[in-house]
Image (cartoon, grey):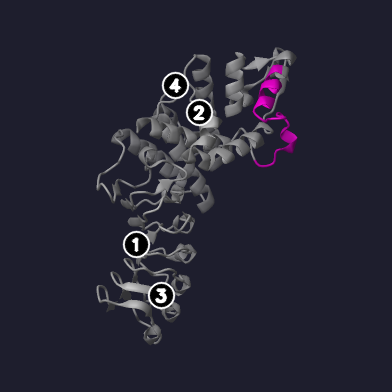
Amino acid sequence: ELDLSNNHLEGDIDLSPLSASTFLESIDLSHNWIRSLDTTPLKGKPSLRTFIVNQNPLSSLDTEFVQSSKGIETFLVDWTQVSTLDLSPLADCKNLKSLGVPQDKIPELDFYPIMDCQLLESLTVSGINSSYIDLWPLFGLPRLSDLTISSRIQFGRFPFSSIHWPLGLESIRHRKSSSYLKEDIDQEGFGLVRERFRTLYEHLNPLARYHLRVAFIEFFDLGHLRGFDGDLLEIIRSMNDFMTFEEAHRFLNDAISRSMIDQVKSGGSTHFIDLNQAHSRPVFAVIASEIVESRRREMNCVSLIRLDEGFDLTELWYTVYGQEVLSALGIGSSTGDAGILRIRHELKKVGIESFGTPDDCNELSPTRLSDELRAYLRFLAIRTSLSKN
């Protein structure tokens, strides 16, 4: 072990004397004035378990050495001035338990490499500037119980106050206020929902697992916000434990979409997206362009099926633009040729030149969770969070 923390080290530090230390297990250089650190001598250290350099004015850090130290359990680089940080070498560190990273000078830190570090218990994200973090990769970490976030970091995907943690994250500690911001939720029901998804989750590949974690957060958040009629918990209770990944997505998408349709028909609020507001406020502008693009792509995936009584508009109701237009026009689940012309006219006002051409659609389908529904739910969560504040 090498512990040089609080040792008044400053400037450029040379670690070359450690090149021959094959069995080095721990190095702690924290709380110094180190501005440059060449980690090349740390390559080829399979016994390395601890690497700590936090609380230093480091401007850069090469993490390539981690590839030969896959047994690392503690990796702390928080509260440094590092402007780029590649976490991909940590993807194979299955024993990683504690991670600290800086966000001060990094525009958007990529947490996807650690989404399969299932033993991770603690994560600290430091910084003083308003940067964005995508927390989705953290949703499936079952042991993550301590997330420390610095005071001015914003969340580009989900707002801090509306996140629900389904697979293990019990508390969120805010560095500035030291307050716990965990949502007050029904623990018994929450546990039941979590177990339903965990049963399905265990049989999925990593990519499918990630998408299911996303689906869980979005649908649970939607149910918690009470934006639509029906109890989401009851919907998920009725899920078959042996559903495949695709079946689960189709089940949830269908159940939620129909709940949205029923809410509109009953005259309830649908919380539709105001894109003018989205473009005028930075927190909304983060996802505004994605919302617009995903809406346009999804509209091409709508199938218009001609029935005896007219065109079946069920799939159009599954889209947010479709819900807005159909609700405004007072059109229900089917319509004739004249109704289709009215719908097309209204859609052109918001930049949708065509819809109902599924032959051109290769990436989206109303039978699975769509990008549009994902973007819509993110916006709903953000707007609800702001209204609370």
- Dot 1 or dot 2: first in sequence order is 1
- Dot 3 or dot 1: first in sequence order is 3
Identify the residue at image location x=51%, y=53%: 206
- Dot 4 or dot 3: first in sequence order is 3
C-alpha separation, residue under disc 3 versus residue under disc 1 = 15 Å
Residue denoted by label 1: 79
Image x and y of residue 90, in percent: 44, 64
C-alpha separation, residue under disc 3 versus residue under disc 2 = 53 Å
- Dot 4 or dot 2: first in sequence order is 4
Judging from the image, what secondary structure is the residue with disc 1 in? loop
In the picture, the quarter occupied by the C terminus is top left
Q: Which stretch did the figure color magenta? A: 342-363
Q: Is residue 334 magenta?
A: no
C-alpha separation, residue under disc 4 versus residue under disc 3 = 57 Å
Amino acid type at circle 1 is Trp
Image x and y of residue 40, in percent: 45, 79
Which labelled disc corresponds to residue 36? 3
Residue denoted by label 2: 256
Left or right of 151: which side holds 198?
A: right
Judging from the image, what secondary structure is the residue with disc 3 in? strand
